[in-house]
Image (spheres, helix red, strand yellow):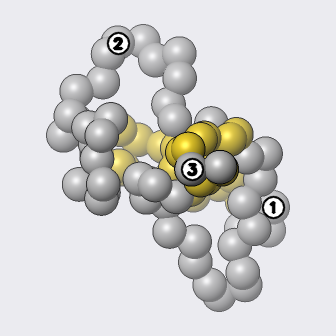
Amino acid sequence: TLHRTLEQRGMMTMDAVDALEVPAKGSVELKPGGYHIMIMNVAHPLKVGEAVDLVFTFEHAGKVSVTAKVAPIAATKAP
């Protein structure tokens, strides 16, 4: 699922996001502490550094496949 990290009343929280608008010919960065992906209901525990294949579905661009590396839960930047 897609989430974002927010600071509310001095506490960090994560909220699920239904959609993320990517500007035409622009980009949105997914990173710890901001918008990020939480992979749920996996078949086996993911290990830090492991590569995971993901498919993003865009309204106009269709499906885009990417490979991502698993980061530690306390990561402050992408691996």
Residues at badges 2 and 1 in contact (C-beta under 8 Å)? no
Q: Residue at x 73, y 46 (%)?
A: 17
Query: SS for tag 1?
Result: loop
Q: Residue under circle 1?
A: 59
| Residue 56 visible in the current orientation | no
Farthest residue, direction front: 9
Q: Nearer the viewer, residue 12 or 68?
A: 12
Residue 40 rendering spot, x and y as whole percentages: 53, 23
Q: Residue at x 68, y 41 (%)?
A: 15
Residue 21 horizontal side relative to residue 1, left or right: right
| Residue 21 visible in the current orientation | yes
Residues at badges 2 and 3 in contact (C-beta under 8 Å)? no
Q: Residue under circle 2?
A: 44
Q: Nearer the viewer, residue 52 or 13?
A: 13
Q: Is residue 59 above or below residue 39?
A: below
Residue 11 horizontal side relative to residue 58, left or right: left
Query: SS for tag 2?
Result: loop
Q: Give residue 35's quadrant in the image.
A: bottom right
First-in-chain label (2 vs 1): 2
Residue 70 rendering spot, x and y as whole percentages: 29, 40
Density class for disc 2 (Cα within 10 Å; few <14, some 14-19, many ≥20) is: few
Q: CA distance from mark 2 to mark 3?
A: 35 Å
First-in-chain label (2 vs 3): 3
Q: Residue under circle 3?
A: 10
Q: Which mark is residue 45?
A: none
- The residue type indicated by label 2 comes to His
First-in-chain label (1 vs 3): 3
